[in-house]
Amino acid sequence: MKFTPAKAPLTGETLETLTARLAGRQEPAFRAKQILDWVYKKRARSWDEMTNLSKPLRTWLDETFDLMPVSLITGQQSTDVTDKLLLELGDRSLIETVIIRVPQEGVGLDHSRKTICISTQVGCAMGCVFCASGLAGLKRNLNAGEIVAQLLQVCYREDARTPRARQELASFDNIVVMGMGEPLANYDAIIRALTIVNADWGLGFGARRITLSTSGLVPKILQLAEEPLGIRLAISLHGATDEVREQIMPVNKAYPLAKLLPAVKAFSDKHGRMVTLEFILIEEVNDSLIQAEKLRDIALDLHAHVNLIPYNTVEGLPWKRPSNTRQERFADILRNSRVSVTLRREKGHDIDAACGQLRLKTEKDREAAIASA
Ligand code: SAH
Ligand code: SF4
């Protein structure tokens, strides 16, 4: 289903496209930058705050653009470290954006490092059997403006929590594109959104602090490798042989490991940076020691980092996480070969698990959240 908003979201405009729109009104070239400064640097929440713009221009902007295309329904602090923002889109679809606070030694939570997990689609078409995001299929792609707006909503919230001592661009440290949806199936919108997030006229957020996770759309990984953006890549591997991967990720039929792994290598060669292999540990599915050995070989070959994620159970799905001992035995096989590996089990501290939790929310829960808001 395609959604065409009544007004274009301002957060989907680049400096170039906005300048072109304003040129039609005989506005000077600096005007677009001035407007984007109000949005991203001064965090204006209404056109009337933009006091250096004439009233007729503000009226035209209001008629032409939607200043904020997503609205905050609830912001729930679910644990001491994760905040979930439930956001409503123009067609009333709901998405979640998660703020994960990683406490730093000796400082309070307000000064912790913050990672923001953003969504790129409503639902997902990829059909991975363990994932709640794809259970109801794909509803629609988010547009670039809706993707950028999730981050601005986080800025509004964080600005209110910790008043900024100086004019900061963003109020967080990392962005992970690991929320609902397959980002590379919505390629143009995610690239445009991250370009806006990265640009100095936008959020000015460093590309090296952005990680995009994909289930493995090979042609798009190769296309991403050619982008000048320079973001980091994570691959949802979850199976170290075709036999295992194919059982849980239908995408493996179109892009088996013999196609996926060379594409990942091409990406890391091009960018000279380690790619992350995400591997959810699911009991009796992919947690055998043979899988660990195969994963070790893949990681060594790609010089990749491995992130082991104990599975988060999803209501209605039969999969379970293995015991702690089994998780450790799996991890040890990688560690013993000096593969760079993380296995985080503390609840909430695990970014991927926290993002994975997004999928635990059903539409029903969401309706309940709205009702109680
Ligand atoms: N579609 C992309 C990005 C979103 S998913 C992708 O699949 O990479 C982000 C991560 O959460 C993926 O690695 C995904 O496999 C994982 N995930 C999905 N369901 C999960 C669950 N129930 N428990 C733990 N991780 C899960
Ligand atoms: Fe989609 Fe990623 Fe979930 Fe697979 S794991 S269904 S690609 S969101």
Image (tube, helix red, strand yellow):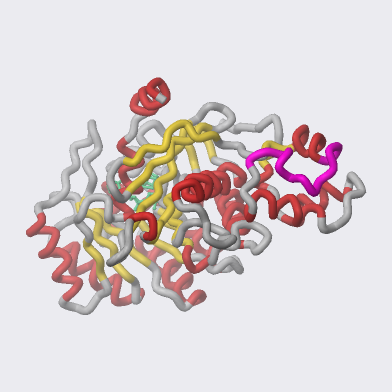
Residue furthest out toward the top? 371
Q: Is residue 56 magenta?
A: yes
Which residues are drawn in magenta?
A: 45-57
Q: Is residue 339 magenta?
A: no
In the image, taking residue 215 as reference, residue 319 lies left or right, namely left
Report the number of discs: 0
In the image, residue 339 sits, relative to residue 128, either above or below, namely below
Give coordinates of residue 130: x percent, y percent: 28, 43
Q: Which quarter of the figure has residue 240?
A: bottom left
Identify which residue is drawn at 32% across, 46% down: 356
**171, 126: nearer the viewer:** 171
In the image, residue 38 sits, relative to residue 103, either above or below, namely above
Give coordinates of residue 135: x percent, y percent: 35, 34
Identify which residue is drawn at 48% across, 35% down: 87
In the image, taking residue 245 as reference, residue 66 lies left or right, namely right
**38, 244: nearer the viewer:** 38
In the image, taking residue 273 as reference, residue 305 lies left or right, namely left
Give coordinates of residue 102: x percent, y percent: 32, 59
The answer to whether residue 255 is seen in the rendering is no
Residue furthest out toward the right? 26
Identify which residue is drawn at 28% across, 55% down: 350
The answer to whether residue 301 is seen in the rendering is yes
In the image, taking residue 85 as reference, residue 19 lies left or right, namely right
Residue furthest out toward the left? 325
Q: Which quarter of the figure has residue 137?
A: top left
Q: Quadrant of the C terminus?
A: top left
Give coordinates of residue 92: x percent, y percent: 53, 27
In the image, residue 363 sits, relative to residue 83, either above or below, namely above
Identify which residue is drawn at 38% across, 55% down: 110
Q: Which quarter of the figure has residue 344?
A: bottom left
Q: Quadrant of the N terminus?
A: top right
